[in-house]
Each structure stands twice: as structure tokens, then as C-alpha cells.
Image (cartoon, rainbow, N blue to C red):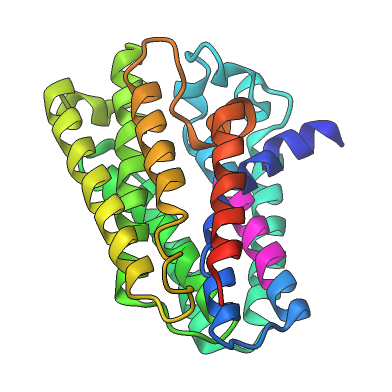
């Protein structure tokens, strides 16, 4: 049982926190929160993301066997056969899609199906193309924000989408920057051949600037934040981005969103501070 849980990688569900980002702002704006619908959609999407991880493990089994860390994954190590992993993929995807599509929302269904299609394209080879890989990774995070909005029947604002997209690009670029700093084998991640440190540094600075500026504009123009408190959460966003940028440039450090979320106490405190600042600022 443990090996099957390891295959599904539920600890990676932390990435789905992007689904929750619109929640406090939307609820303060009067959106109706149907807890059952939201929980079902959230759990369904988590199962779909696990199915995607299993598919990646199946597709990358040969490369993973040559990787220092990934060779211990269930499929790469032989603990679970390819056929067994395919069966696990089918079960996770079927249940996840059943839960999400069963909600009966066309918007939710479209987001979920787009996410599955996007990751099929990524797994089938697009992840080996520089820039394309970053676009697809970032799109996955933005779709999570859309899903969070549609689960509570609200439309995302343009500034929220711009901020989310810029932050998503930042996370994806930071991961590639950390891969170069760690001298990851280009045979394992071919897209790295298309990147250079100077290019990624400039791209990271651009994405960080757009994310900060768009978040500031979003909060200032928000109708659900109290006057004089709109920018209370901005320092936490600035610290989080700058600290993540620092980690991406340190050889041996990790810029994986999952590792940072679980290992970095400062980032955990930053996230808590952001949440408290937002709650304090809401009308």
C-alpha cells in the first residue's frame, strides 16, 4: 500500500494551493461557498494531478533510472511494473474526472479537461522544448486559479490572472534556474540545453517584477479590501518572491515548490503572514 501512495505522490498536492488563492477575496465579495461542491472538486483535481505524476513516471522510466534521486521511484526501481502503473493511472484519472465532471459545471469540466490535455502534451515530449516547457508548467498553475474561481461560481479578475500567471512563470523559471545551478544532466532534462544562466536571470527578474506590480494593482483596486489596508499583504509577497529567487541561485539548494513548501520555515511563516494580512484587510 505504501508504495502505491508513493507512486501517487500526495505530498505534491501542495501545488493545488493555487486553487485556494481566489477564495478569501471571492467570499469577501459575496460569493456563495458550497463546501461540498468545493471539496469534491478539490479532491477530484488532486487525484487527476496524481494520475499525471504516474503518467510522467511511466514515460520517464528509463531516464529516471539514471537519476540519483528519481531512480528510487516505484516504477523506475521496479517496485511497480509499467502495467501496474498504467492501471493506477487509469484508476486515478477515472475517479478524479468522475468527481470533477460530476459537479455538473461546464466551466469546471473545461478547466479539468484542459489540464489533462495540457499535461498529455507535456509528457509526450513538449517538456523537452525550452520555453515551451515553462509555458506549459505555468499554464497548469493558472488553470488551478481558474478552477478555484469556477468552483465558487465567480469570474477571475484580469489582475488576479496576470498576477497568477506571472507568479507561475516565476516558479517554473526558478526551477530551471536551480537545475542549471545544480548541473542537472541535460540527457535527463533536454530542455536545459536551450537555457542559459544570464537568460534565466533576466526572465526571472521580469516575472518577479510583473508579479509584484500586478499584485499591488490588484489589491489597490480591489473592492473587498478596507481602505488603508490594501497593501498590508504586499510585503509578504515581496519577501516570498525574493527569497525564492535567492534559493534558485544557490548551488545545492532546491527551488522545487514542493520542497520549499515543506522544508523552508521562513517561507511557511511568510505564507501564514500573507494569509493573516489578507484576512485583516478584508471588509
Q: Is residue 25 left or right of residue 205?
A: right
Question: 196 or 171: nearer the eye?
Answer: 171
Q: Quadrant of the N terminus?
A: top right
Question: 258 or 5: nearer the eye?
Answer: 258
At x 19% / y 30%, what residue is drawn?
Answer: 200
Q: Is residue 187 visible?
A: no
Rendered location of residue 14, percent (x, y):
62, 46
Question: 19 or 233: nearer the eye?
Answer: 233
Q: On screen, 39 above or below 242?
A: below
Q: Is residue 225 visible?
A: yes
Rendered location of residue 162, percent (x, y):
29, 64
Does the magenta run of residues contain 79?
no
Does the magenta run of residues contain 48?
yes
At x 60% / y 64%, what residue is drawn?
Answer: 279
At x 62% / y 28%, what residue is drawn?
Answer: 265
In the rendered structure, which segment of residues is drawn in magenta? 41-52
- Which residue of the protein is positioned furthest toward the right in this rendering? 1
Q: Is residue 118 left or right of residue 263?
A: left
Rendered location of residue 262, percent (x, y):
64, 31
> Dividing the picture into quarters, in which one does residue 130 lie?
top left
Please give the count of numbered marks on the rendered protein. 0
> Dividing the picture into quarters, in which one does residue 276 lie?
bottom right
Q: On screen, 187 above or below 132?
A: above
Secondary structure mainly formed by the magenta segment: helix
Question: 141 or 118: nearer the eye?
Answer: 141
Q: On screen, 268 above or below 282?
A: above
- Which residue of the protein is positioned furthest toward the front in this rendering? 228
At x 64% / y 25%, what residue is drawn?
Answer: 73
Amino acid at each position: 500500500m505504501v508504495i502505491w501512495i508513493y507512486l501517487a505522490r500526495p505530498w505534491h498536492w501542495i501545488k493545488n494551493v493555487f486553487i485556494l488563492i481566489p477564495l478569501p477575496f471571492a467570499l469577501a465579495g459575496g460569493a456563495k461557498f458550497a463546501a461540498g461542491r468545493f471539496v469534491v472538486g478539490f479532491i477530484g483535481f488532486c487525484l487527476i494531478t496524481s494520475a499525471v505524476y504516474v503518467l510522467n513516471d511511466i514515460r520517464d522510466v528509463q531516464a529516471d533510472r539514471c537519476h540519483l534521486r528519481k531512480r528510487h521511484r516505484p516504477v523506475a526501481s521496479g517496485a511497480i511494473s509499467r502495467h501496474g502503473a498504467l492501471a493506477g493511472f487509469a484508476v486515478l484519472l477515472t475517479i478524479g474526472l468522475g468527481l470533477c465532471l460530476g459537479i455538473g459545471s461546464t466551466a469546471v469540466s473545461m478547466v479539468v479537461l484542459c489540464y489533462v490535455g495540457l499535461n498529455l502534451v507535456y509528457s509526450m515530449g513538449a517538456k523537452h522544448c525550452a520555453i515551451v516547457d515553462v509555458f506549459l508548467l505555468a499554464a497548469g498553475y493558472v488553470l488551478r486559479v481558474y478552477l478555484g474561481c469556477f468552483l465558487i461560481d465567480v469570474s477571475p479578475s484580469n489582475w488576479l490572472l496576470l498576477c497568477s500567471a506571472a507568479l507561475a512563470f516565476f516558479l517554473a523559471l526558478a526551477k530551471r534556474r536551480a537545475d542549471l545551478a545544480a548541473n542537472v544532466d541535460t540527457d535527463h532534462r533536454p530542455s536545459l540545453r536551450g537555457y542559459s544562466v544570464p537568460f534565466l536571470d533576466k526572465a526571472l527578474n521580469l516575472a518577479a517584477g510583473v508579479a509584484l506590480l500586478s499584485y499591488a494593482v490588484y489589491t489597490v483596486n480591489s473592492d473587498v479590501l478596507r481602505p488603508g489596508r490594501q497593501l498590508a499583504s504586499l510585503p509578504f509577497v515581496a519577501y516570498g518572491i525574493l527569497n525564492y529567487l535567492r534559493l534558485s541561485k544557490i548551488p545545492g539548494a532546491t527551488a522545487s515548490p514542493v520542497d520549499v513548501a515543506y522544508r523552508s520555515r521562513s517561507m511557511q511563516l511568510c505564507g501564514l503572514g500573507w494569509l493573516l494580512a489578507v484576512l485583516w484587510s478584508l471588509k
